[in-house]
Image (cartoon, rainbow, N blue to C red):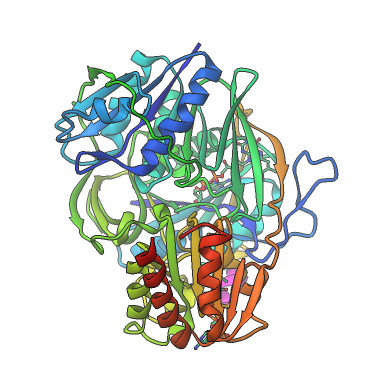
Amino acid sequence: MANVLVVAEIKEGEPKKVTLELLTVGGRIASGLGGTLNAVAIGTGLGGIETKLGAHGAKTVYVADGVASYNSEGYTKILADVVAKDGSGLVFFAASSQGRDLAPRLAARLDAAFAADCVEIDVDGGKVKVKRPVFSGKAFATLTMDGTAVVSLRPNSYPVAEGAGPAAATVAAGGDFGAVKAQVVDVVAGQSGTVDLTEADRIVSGGRALKSADNFKLLWDMAKVINATVGASRAAVDSGFAPHAMQVGQTGKTVNPTLYVACGISGAIQHLAGMRTSKVIVAINKDPEAPIFQKADYGIVADLFEAVPVMQKEFEKLLAEA
Amino acid sequence: MNIVVLCKQVPDTESRIKLKGDGSGFDMDGIKWILNPYDEYAVEEALKIKEAGKAEKVTVVGLGPDRIVESLRTALAMGADDAVHVKTGDDYGDNLAVAKALAAAVKDLNPGLILTGRQAIDTDMGAVQSMVAELLGCGQINVVSKLEVDGGKVKGWRDVEGGAKQVVESSTPAVVSANKGLNEPRYASLPGIMKAKRKPVAVKEPAAAVNKAKLTACSLPEERKAGKVFQGVESVPEVVKLLRTEAKVI
Ligand SMILES: Cc1cc2nc3c(=O)[nH]c(=O)nc-3n(C[C@H](O)[C@H](O)[C@H](O)COP(=O)(O)OP(=O)(O)OC[C@H]3O[C@@H](n4cnc5c(N)ncnc54)[C@H](O)[C@@H]3O)c2cc1C
Ligand SMILES: Cc1cc2nc3c(=O)[nH]c(=O)nc-3n(C[C@H](O)[C@H](O)[C@H](O)COP(=O)(O)OP(=O)(O)OC[C@H]3O[C@@H](n4cnc5c(N)ncnc54)[C@H](O)[C@@H]3O)c2cc1C
């Protein structure tokens, strides 16, 4: 009997979508392990968070309120204490930048099995079993974990079940870090108001064919209509059309959206590495031989400068109907 | 101060990945092996810090079978001073086992700074660096695209969500993992390559690995089949309609 502990990420008082995904699939894993689904939230302004996490299935929520900024060592200490109290058999993170930073450190502290960036999770013979992409998504490895498992899950891997469960019981977790060696001294804001690529449900991406940074406005305009985020190929980033934070691919971000619209992107293997798990791929390219057409569900052989504005109008029309 | 750079050998990005006949693992026959691209950024940064007079020595440490010495030599040819080969079989262990063996080797070298890649591009976990930091009781600054070293402190600009950067300051020794954008790795010069052949590579035997995460199956993704291709701008309304009626994503 072991519990599942979801490490919640809270933004402006609300659990992130990926946290709800973790709770949804975590409930199933908890039954498999014969334990309960619990959650832990660390941050500030967490009043009432047990209602929101409880609605999606958490039974107990450990809350460390009043922790002003992220700290890998400090969070590891708080979480290790909670895990000891909770008897967690699975500590479940989002594969976000915080989860990627923190989860392996916690695994080492707990001397536990670790797997990052998983896309499937199950219980098999009482053990946590995960599937994760390797070789940039060119293959999958299934790992079976002995004892306590620390796992991070890639966003958009599981749907969110609409929950309306009761508020969970809260337990105050110690928020005291003790001495730490590294701390955040400043945060330089990025582009605000858009969802991060790794969490985005829809992405419009541009390649070298965009020709300039200004032309990316074309993509932002269309993205706004369908509530998407904008990405870029490495060639576009290296040419200075877009910042590296927007790069999708092997040396950029790995994305997992429902819809990926590739505009003027040839479809090099290193680009595919970052977006091949997209559920639906649309490609606009003027070269009918472009390799991206081998991977796209819908290919359009056309000049993107003509096609994107038309597509934007069509999206507007369609969404006005609905 | 001495700097240790962790260097992993990985398959070239263009490699075709095949499964072993019995599906028990990956068939690595005929693979071209390279130094993990993110580790090249780490090596370059270490060399720059040394050239700026802020470090005396750069040691590269790699864990794996004999073939990895070739990648350690790549780092030596770039300018690293010496290397440690933690010699294991082909599939030594899970990330925690690897991190424990690397942490033990690093500890013996008593470095002020440990540089690594953001992630290995084969297994893609991005785990070993945080584990090594924890095992050595160091601060960690992951996924940095800018680094400043100043006496007993390091300051790293860490790439987080939405293009934002967290600036993290740590006392040394600290573990810092390199992202693309940190620098432009130099090419090894011909004299560098010649000199690298004579540089020392120490060999270490790690303790037997305790494996908690076991590889129990491998698979290849279903090849994405080419879908429908439409000609010309005129087809855009049709495609948008299909996104609703057929693909159901809008
Ligand atoms: C180690 C390594 C790591 C890499 N990592 C990444 C990575 O993370 N991400 C990444 O993207 N790449 C990466 N690359 C680079 C990759 O190999 C390609 O060079 C890159 O993806 C090409 O970008 P692109 O498709 O925008 O440009 P191009 O290959 O130049 O393609 C441009 C495409 O636009 C089309 N086009 C031109 N004009 C128009 C128009 N007006 N309308 C419509 N179509 C038009 C052309 O037909 C062409 O197909 C990496 C490479 C290496 C070696
Ligand atoms: C044939 C084979 C079988 C395997 N079997 C298993 C298994 O059964 N279970 C399992 O969990 N894993 C298995 N692995 C994966 C193995 O655990 C990983 O190679 C190891 O954990 C490091 O990968 P990572 O993704 O965690 O590295 P990351 O954490 O992504 O690496 C980050 C950084 O750490 C440093 N680093 C990482 N590894 C090394 C290294 N070896 N030498 C020097 N520096 C390094 C580098 O600087 C790198 O950039 C297997 C690997 C192979 C090749």
**Res B147 seen here:** no
In the displayed structure, A210 sits above or below B66; it is below
Q: Which residues are magenta?
A: B187-195
Q: Position of residue B242 (x, y in %)?
A: 56, 66
Find out whether residue A267 is within the magenta segment.
no
**Res A94 seen here:** yes
Q: Main secondary structure of the magenta part?
A: helix
Left or right? Give the position of A255 relative to B140: right
The quarter of the image that holds ligand 1 is bottom right
Judged from this view, the residue extending furthest toward the front is A321
Which residue occupies 35% across, 71% down? A243
- The C terminus of chain A lies in which quarter of the figure? bottom left
Q: Position of residue A34 (x, y in %)?
A: 52, 13
Judged from this view, the residue extending furthest toward the right is B21
Q: Position of residue A135 (x, y in %)?
A: 62, 54
Which residue occupies 56% across, 80% down? B235
In the displayed structure, A132 sits above or below A196; it is above
**Which of A296/A139 is in front?**
A296
**Which of A290/B120 is in front?**
A290
- Locate residue A78: give its quadrant: top left
**Which of A33/A28 is in front?**
A28
Which residue occupies 37% across, 30% down? A163
In the displayed structure, A142 sits above or below A311; it is above
In the displayed structure, A175 sits above or below A260; it is above
Find out whether residue B189 is within the magenta segment.
yes
Q: Position of residue A89 (x, y in %)?
A: 48, 20
Left or right? Give the position of A295 relative to A315: right
**Which of A316/A49 is in front?**
A316
Q: How many callouts does the rendering have?
A: 0
